[in-house]
Image: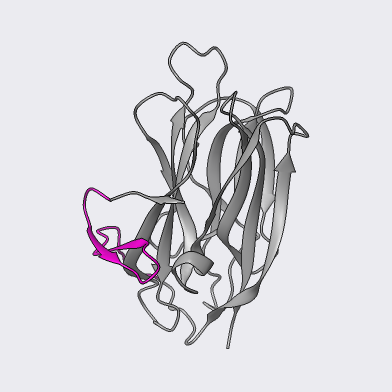
């Protein structure tokens, strides 16, 4: 997995050689308050979409909590569309951002530390990134929605499903989810990949066609919030 430098943050190299940025300007005070000492489960569950196509596959992945620490969740995507002149519409390159949440803190869920990593890139794609990301205030990623083409062979677009905490501040209000904007804006059939109740999105695995440059399967990984 290739780590990319952020334009507005300083790098600090971890022991594993990965880069984690600090001083994120996207910090905001969270409300209502978090419960003290909540943690993220070490056990992961997964939900997947699969086109059924298996030719020319290579893999890509991002695992926020495993790569960077137990408080990291997958909150942002930046993608590139197909190369200019390609008549198909699809995601041809995808990057993910893992953001650290200060789990024991009462009022500030994000520490400001984050890591930006390439998940996959086709041999060619159009310049210019398209972004979609979870808001900073009281927002926790709980799944993805994909837009796929009519033949269900590739992914055209992506957005993140997120939830606020409920009125008690002790659980996620997953019954009233919110959605980030679609990264590119392509039309297509929606495929929903949802984390189980009271779990958050911490990573994904995908397979892509190295010839066509298209995502053929995508699996999200979720981990439960453990409340004290």
Residue nearest the viewer, comparing 3 with 111:
3
- 132 vs 221, left or right, is left
Query: x%, y% of residue 50?
Result: 74, 39
Which quadrant of the figure has residue 167?
bottom right
Range drawn in magenta: 6-30
Q: Is any part of residue 38 visible from this angle? A: yes
Colour convention? one colour
Q: Quadrant of the C terminus?
A: bottom right
* Snapshot quadrant of residue 149: top right
Q: Residue at x 52, y 31 (%)?
A: 91
The vertical placement of 78 against 123, above or below, is below
**x%, y% of residue 200?**
58, 64
Foreground: 190 or 205?
205
Whether 195 is drawn above or below 110: the answer is above
Q: Position of residue 99 (x, y in %)?
A: 41, 62
* Residue shown at 70% from the left, 27% from the top: 153
When the figure is inspected, residue 155 is found, relative to residue 77, above or below; the finding is above
Q: Residue at the location (67% across, 54% down)? A: 194
């Amino acid at each position: 997995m290739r780590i990319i430098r952020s334009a507005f943050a300083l790098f600090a190299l971890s022991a594993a050689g990965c880069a984690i940025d600090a001083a994120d300007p996207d910090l905001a005070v969270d409300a209502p308050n978090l419960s003290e000492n909540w943690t993220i489960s070490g056990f992961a569950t997964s939900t997947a979409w699969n086109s059924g196509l298996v030719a020319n596959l290579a893999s890509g992945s991002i695992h926020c909590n495993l790569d960077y620490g137990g408080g990291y969740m997958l909150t942002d995507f930046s993608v590139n569309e197909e190369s200019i002149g390609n008549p198909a519409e699809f995601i041809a390159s995808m990057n993910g951002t893992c953001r650290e949440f200060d789990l024991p803190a009462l009022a500030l869920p994000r520490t400001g530390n984050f890591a930006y990593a390439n998940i996959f890139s086709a041999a060619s794609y159009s310049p210019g990134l398209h972004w979609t990301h979870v808001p900073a205030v009281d927002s926790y990623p709980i799944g993805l929605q994909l837009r796929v083409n009519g033949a269900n062979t590739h992914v055209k677009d992506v957005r993140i499903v997120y939830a606020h905490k409920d009125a008690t501040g002790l659980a996620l209000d997953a019954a009233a989810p919110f959605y980030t904007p679609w990264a590119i804006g392509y039309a297509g059939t929606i495929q929903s990949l949802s984390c189980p109740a009271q779990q958050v999105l911490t990573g994904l695995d995908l397979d892509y066609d190295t010839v066509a440059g298209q995502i053929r399967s995508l699996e999200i990984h979720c981990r439960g919030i453990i409340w004290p």
